[in-house]
Image (tube, rainbow, N blue to C red):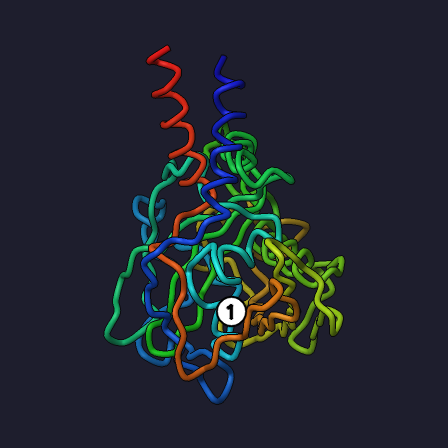
Amino acid sequence: MLAHTLALAAAASLALASAEPSSPVPALLVRDAGAGYKDPNDDGGSMFTHVNGTYPPGLGEPLNVIISANSDPEVLVDSLYKGGFQNYMLSGGLSTECLGGGFGSKQNASLDATHRNETQIGVLRQNYGDPYLGACKETFDGGNHLRYWRQNSTNALFLAVSVEMSLEKQHDIVPNGYNLGRDYLVGNLTGHQIDSRNVSNTTVITGSSTGNSTWGNYTYQTEARYVSGLLNDSSDGVNHYITVEAEGHPAIDGLVAVLTVKITGRPQGEKPASAAGTSAAGPAKTVSALLLSGALAVGAGWLLL
């Protein structure tokens, strides 16, 4: 009966997802003329998240992927609609939390001088090819996942990506899991297989001119530049460093993948947003939230039968 209810919920969610919300929320569209982000360390911030209750205290997860503010403006909007960030991540195989829940602990990051210890916007999980229920599998079995924040001064998005173990193993990070998580994501978005031990600060990986990842009738071209100087090639300050160090290498290689994303394909008749201003559909409902609302509606109907 539960499987039948979830199947009906998924169908209900598809219907909901096809209709855009009626209340547009203005998008933040600040673009940086240079790299498209600022080094948080320059403003007294950090390229590590703040994790509560670590041993020893003060450990964090590396912010090892940045979506540059020089990307197309729609990609920087935290939305499932109009080619937004959540849709872009679906093209890379990650969905929002299982059934809209928040099962893990929240982390903070300090990316701007005036925005300290901001709580993560959300968590995305590997969906194993199922955008509706796949995040539930990752929650229990482990896999690639990320947390993300917005750098308010530039509008860039900062991601902490890693491959985690199963819930039974308390979501510890697999050996080399921070580098692997970064490169699995980059690989899925660019259509390239990446060897984490062979990347350097000269590595540039670009998808084809027509784009290499698609979802919801949007096609994205991603350029990834591996940048040094933001993090160190070290285990110092890294959460789960004991399990992550592998083959004589430190927990992280000190490289950050900076992604510049262009939308190369759109639904028929849709025009690109300008950098001067646009709006994104909202408030954004995630795939999992749509599924949860569908499940509640179907469940309520089943209880009345």
Q: Position of residue 289 (x, y in %)?
A: 40, 40
Question: Residue at image x 60%, y 37%?
Answer: 130
Q: Position of residue 226 (x, y in %)?
A: 62, 72
Q: Is residue 93 above or below residue 4?
A: below
Q: Residues within 10 Å of mark 1 (few under 14, many from 20)?
A: many
In the displayed structure, does residue 32 sit left or right of residue 117? right
Question: Residue at image x 39%, y 15%?
Answer: 302
Q: Quadrant of residue 276?
A: bottom left
Q: Nearer the viewer, residue 284 or 259?
A: 284
Residue topped by disc 1: 67
Q: Is residue 152 above or below residue 297?
A: below
Q: Position of residue 189 (x, y in %)?
A: 65, 60
Q: Quadrant of residue 28?
A: bottom left
What amino acid is found at the position of numbered circle 1 in the picture? Ile
Q: Is residue 120 above or below residue 140?
A: below
Report how many numbered discs are placed on residues in the image.
Answer: 1
Q: Position of residue 144 (x, y in %)?
A: 57, 46
Q: Nearer the viewer, residue 10 or 187?
A: 10
Q: Is residue 164 above or below residue 81?
A: above
Secondary structure at numbered mark 1: strand
Question: Residue at image x 48%, y 20%?
Answer: 5
